[in-house]
């Protein structure tokens, strides 16, 4: 009998990626064959995102595409969109199973118990029941692994549905996460990205702290690099900064959400810092790690954002000169306070503001990468091959290209960095 095939479609964040990889291991251990997302499968699992209306729409379009391609395939949908709007998803032709975020640990069992296609079964839970922790880490797909250390968020920003979709902040014990890191090391992956919804808020469940976790992971043999996927500025403490600066394993790479460079807009967003505090945290990083990669999230077009507010944001970012900007136009999410805020910004205005910040990002990222020319750095090379070249990243996330050499994949090499191309990639010369 031919083994049943399953594929996975991950939308959204690194957290979803780690969870989808864990689903895949469960199915493979159950005797299923995992196939690529674009291959025909008997079962299609979608791990959805709902951070914007565009994310919801992308999930709906994907469901319809999968059903058209293979009308007999079982389609199971989980994730944040499934948590927030399960009946909306269940009404789409082709869907067989909708599971809440709290039910992710049961996904394999519920899918494999289905006799075949039929009316969609919905397993949902109320927000205050989102208390389970689905342990997850990615494996087998990339040089680096994503390790989920925390879930949920207690911050309730005025524009965000994450608290409703993921529940309260919670985590696994450090000892269990160290054990998972050792599994990752045993599989041969060299780098771990520490991920969560509000990663720096680690410890709510166990009474431990994020710095305790970092210190414990630092001792895991076989892992050569760690990155912190994202950390709120109010949780990026001097102790964490000093630890990352001193540890050879923790890379000089920080992703810090800003959202607005206007203190007035930050107040409307219910963020927990001012621009002065944010700028001070960036300077604290640079005092100990002058060449750190700093990525910043920004939302434009928030209700009430005037042209003066946007110009203040633009000027603030230009002065900070981060290595990269992740820019998002404001998207109304039903049930959030911001939906009812006055001063809606026209979509054409928001689009123009996005374009201005994208141009700023291109300039700042180019400047950051160009400063690496002529220096030496350790580069972890990945398996991607394009135009006869292979690619890898320095500790501070400059991308480097060298002629492809299979023996160098998943190895850390000392490299002299050469000139930068139009994509901001640096030519590399492997030393030794």
Image (cartoon, rainbow, N blue to C red):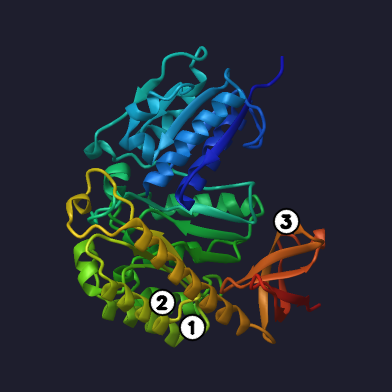
- Where 339 falls versus 192 (above or below)? above
* Residue found 46% across the figure and 61% down from its top: 229
Image depth: mark 2 or mark 3 in front: 3
> Which quadrant holds residue 384?
bottom right
User: Is residue 127 shown above or below 278?
Assistant: above
Q: Which mark is residue 241?
A: 2
Q: How many marks?
A: 3
Direction from residue 393 to residue 267 in the image, left or right: left
Helix, strand or loop for disc 3: strand
First of labels 1, 2 by sequence position: 2
Sort mark 2 into few (<14), some (14-19) or many (20+) by Cα contacts within 10 Å. Answer: many
Percent x, y of residue 47:
47, 38
Q: Quadrant of residue 303?
A: bottom left
- Contact between labelled residues 2 and 1, with CB atoms less than 8 Å apart: yes
Of mark 1 and mark 3, the one earlier in the sequence is 1
In three-dimensional space, the C-alpha distance between marks 1 and 3, rounded to whole angstroms, equals: 29 Å
| Label 1 vs label 3, nearer the camera | 3
Q: Tag 2, which secondary structure? A: helix
Query: Which residue lies at the image location 41% right of the left edge and 19% below the top edge?
Result: 120
Q: Are marks 2 and 3 in contact (CB under 8 Å)?
A: no
Determine whether, in the image, residue 139 is placed left or right of residue 136. right
Whether residue 355 is visible, yes or no, is yes
The residue that disc 3 covers is 383
Q: Which residue is mark 1?
A: 289
Kindly report the distance in space between the C-alpha atoms of the residues bearing marks 2 and 3. Answer: 31 Å
- Answer few, some or many: residues within 10 Å of disc 1's Cα (few below 14, many 20 plus, some between 14 and 19): some
Tell me which residue sits at (43%, 45%) in the image: 55
């Amino acid at each position: 009998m031919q083994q049943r095939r399953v594929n996975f479609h991950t939308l959204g964040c690194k957290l979803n990626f780690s969870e989808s990889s864990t689903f895949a291991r469960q199915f493979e251990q159950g005797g299923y064959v995992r196939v690529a997302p674009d291959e025909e499968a008997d079962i299609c699992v979608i791990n959805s995102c709902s951070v914007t209306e565009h994310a919801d729409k992308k999930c709906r379009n994907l469901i319809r595409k999968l059903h058209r391609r293979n009308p007999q395939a079982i389609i199971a949908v989980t994730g944040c969109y499934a948590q927030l709007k399960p009946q909306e998803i269940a009404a789409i032709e082709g869907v067989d199973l909708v599971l809440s975020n709290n039910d992710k640990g049961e996904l394999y069992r519920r899918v494999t118990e289905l006799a075949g296609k039929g009316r969609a079964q919905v397993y949902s839970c109320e927000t205050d029941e989102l208390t389970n922790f689905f342990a997850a880490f990615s494996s087998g797909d990339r040089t680096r692994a994503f390790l989920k250390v925390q879930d949920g968020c207690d911050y309730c920003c005025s524009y965000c549905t994450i608290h409703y979709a993921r529940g309260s902040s919670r985590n696994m014990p450090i000892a269990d996460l160290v054990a998972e890191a050792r599994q990752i090391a045993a599989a041969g992956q060299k780098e771990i990205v520490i991920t969560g919804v509000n990663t720096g808020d680690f410890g709510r469940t166990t009474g431990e702290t994020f710095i305790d976790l970092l210190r414990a992971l630092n001792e895991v043999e076989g892992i050569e690099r760690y990155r912190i996927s994202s950390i709120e500025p109010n949780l990026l403490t001097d102790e964490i900064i000093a630890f990352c600066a001193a540890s050879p394993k923790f890379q000089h790479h920080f992703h810090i959400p800003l959202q607005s460079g206007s203190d007035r807009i930050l107040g409307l967003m219910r963020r927990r810092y001012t621009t002065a505090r944010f700028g001070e945290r960036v300077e604290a990083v640079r005092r100990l790690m002058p060449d750190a990669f700093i990525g910043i999230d920004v939302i434009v077009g928030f209700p009430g954002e005037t042209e003066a507010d946007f110009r203040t944001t633009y000027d603030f970012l230009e002065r900070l000169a981060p290595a990269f900007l992740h820019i998002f136009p404001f998207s109304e999410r039903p049930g959030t306070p911001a939906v009812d805020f006055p001063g809606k910004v026209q979509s054409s205005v928001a689009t123009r503001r996005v374009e201005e910040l994208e141009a700023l990002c291109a300039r700042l990222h180019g400047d950051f990468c160009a400063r690496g020319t002529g220096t030496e750095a350790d580069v972890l090379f990945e398996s991607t091959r394009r135009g006869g070249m292979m690619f890898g990243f320095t500790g501070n996330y400059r991308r480097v290209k060298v002629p492809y050499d299979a023996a160098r994949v998943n190895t850390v090499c000392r490299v002299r960095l050469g000139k930068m191309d139009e994509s901001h990639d640096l030519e590399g010369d492997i030393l030794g």
